[in-house]
Amino acid sequence: MGRAFLTIQSIFFATYLLLSAAPIQAEEPKKDIREFTEHFIDPSGDYSPWMFIPESNIKTISSTELPGLLMIEEAGKGEDIKGILKDPINLEDYTLPFEYHLAWLQPEEKAGDAQTNYAIGLNLAVTFSDPSTWPEDRTQMPPDTRSLQLFVVRIGNYGEVYREGVAQLRFGDLNYGDPSPEAYFVYGRGDLTPNVNGNWHIPYMWVGYEPPKKGDHGCAFHWSWGKHGGPAQSGGLQDVRFRVRVITPTKIEIGFGYGYVAGWRMRVIDLSRFGPVTGVWELGPIVSLDNWMADEMAHEIDVHPVPVLDPPNTGGHAYTIDYMEMYGSGPENFDHLSNDFNIPGTIPFLKFFIEGDGLFDTWSNPGYLTVTFSGKKTSWAMCPMLDAQMTSGLGYVELDKFEPPLELEIGFVAPDDSIPWNLWHSIGIIDERGGSHYWSPTIQNIPGKGRFYVNSVSQDPYELAENPDVDIRFAEEVPQSVMTHEPLRMLIQFMDKSHIRVGLRGPDTEPWHFSEPFDTSEQWGEIEKFSLPCPGSTVGLKGAKVGNYPRHLRFLIDYIRYGYGTSD
């Protein structure tokens, strides 16, 4: 059991190796960065406090024509279109770190016989100047301001051999040997940092036939008819997305992602040579509509002869933004990681590291995060992306800086009880003497016996495990009518530095069934810090017989909520 336990434990603990070691300060945020989140679902079409400039180059803009999407048609004036906030973000007004996520849908790939050239992406401008010197005109940059733009670029034309597109792109390195006269790539520009500029070399895959050689049989008309992954991702509910993390006034990260694939290609921007950032002057979407692609970019993409590019266009299709999400991701505002999963289409790995063997989506069961298990591995987990103090590879919430009470609540609909399953949280605790303790509050189902609360994950799907280090118990057994309710709700509370407990209930109108408080001071001392819990499941154990079809074991997570205080 020891080896298996350490293997499972390492899956979840390894996540925290990726977390930032940024210093934290316990200050109350003056403003809530989440106010800038926009999903374009207001029936009135209101998407303030965002605005799009310049108005002279916007023919139409609407969030009601395609509800849930912002549709932009340009007016042909040859000016870049940018989305910005009506007021800049003064870093003194917000708690760091915070994140911004932007999702675009690709324009139609089959857009006629002419070149279809466009660049859609992310714009960021930060200033190092005194806020008292900032201009009132949002279209004017303050002194000492630097910027970058990160684009998904598409040049050329789709597939069929009779289309000219950009002929020298065929079979090239830029399009990964695609016989189609087109290419997609991620490209950065700007004066903020050189390590973002140029081609990011993020690959994609083209599908079709290898072109036939002279005299060979083959499909000469449709050599290449589709692109998948990376900057070419299209044809699904998610296409391409961008990410900005403002971690400290001298450290920012920027990244690119695509489709349903969990994870990001990130780059770190060290701004210490310029001094601390005082404000984010611009942050939002951008469409390149001037001559930059033809006059500058075409000369820098290592294609010879240098492509002669037509002006940016989408073949008559609008530019479409899916969402813009903002939230804090530090211990001061860890409650921002809460999610009710009530907006289908928002991907879960904005706020969580997705690990192991689970397909996560918010589409198949609206109002829930659906986690479908394939059966080929033993576990899955979703660990919150929290910037926190680092110890031994783990990101911790320090109770001296963030005083309890603190709590986590999850509501979920379990799989079929005719097969074994569990759902648990991976929590690492460090005591005042530096000792480490591992606690996994778990709901475990054993067919024919019922559902149980336990403090450790069992490696036998038909037996319960003990955890003498954290031995939380209920004075009375929680009724099975509560344990089998849909959704079942589980509450984990850090009541103070030496007491933790668990609550369970069915309907949210019913009272909690609380465990007896566990006094850590009697066992191993007060709690110094703890890692924010990772929900997960070890369901694919030998003997569990969960498999794939006809099982398709599935959890429906109704919500995950983090917060200060304790529920009664």
Image (cartoon, rainbow, N blue to C red):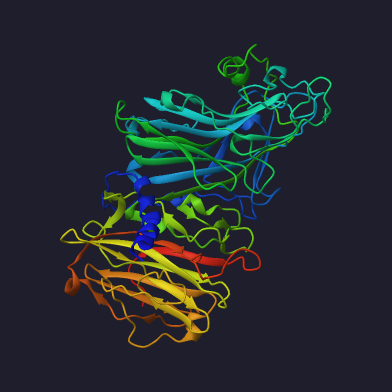
Compare residues 469 and 116 and report the one nearer the observer. Answer: 469
Quarter in which the N terminus is drawn: bottom left
Q: Residue at x 56, y 69 (%)?
A: 545
Compare residues 39 and 188 and report the one nearer the observer. Answer: 188
Measured from the top left, where is residue 29 in percent x and y? Answer: 33, 52
Measured from the top left, where is residue 23 in percent x and y? Answer: 27, 45
In the visual, does 109 lie left or right of 125?
A: right
Tell which residue pokes out farthest to the top in this image. 305
Residue 199 visible in the shown view: yes
Residue 333, quarter of picture: bottom left
Q: Residue at x 78, y 22 (%)?
A: 213
Tell which residue pokes out farthest to the left in this image. 433
Compared with 400, 518 (above or below) is below
In the visual, does 335 lie left or right of 302?
A: left
Compared with 390, 373 (above or below) is below
Compare residues 91 and 489 and report the one nearer the observer. Answer: 489
Residue 54 visible in the shown view: no
Compared with 438, 203 (above or below) is above
Quarter in which the C terminus is drawn: bottom left
Measured from the top left, where is residue 349 in percent x and y? Answer: 50, 51
Number of marks in picture: 0
Residue 294, quarter of picture: top right
Compared with 155, 515 (above or below) is below
Measured from the top left, where is residue 230 in percent x and y? Answer: 59, 37
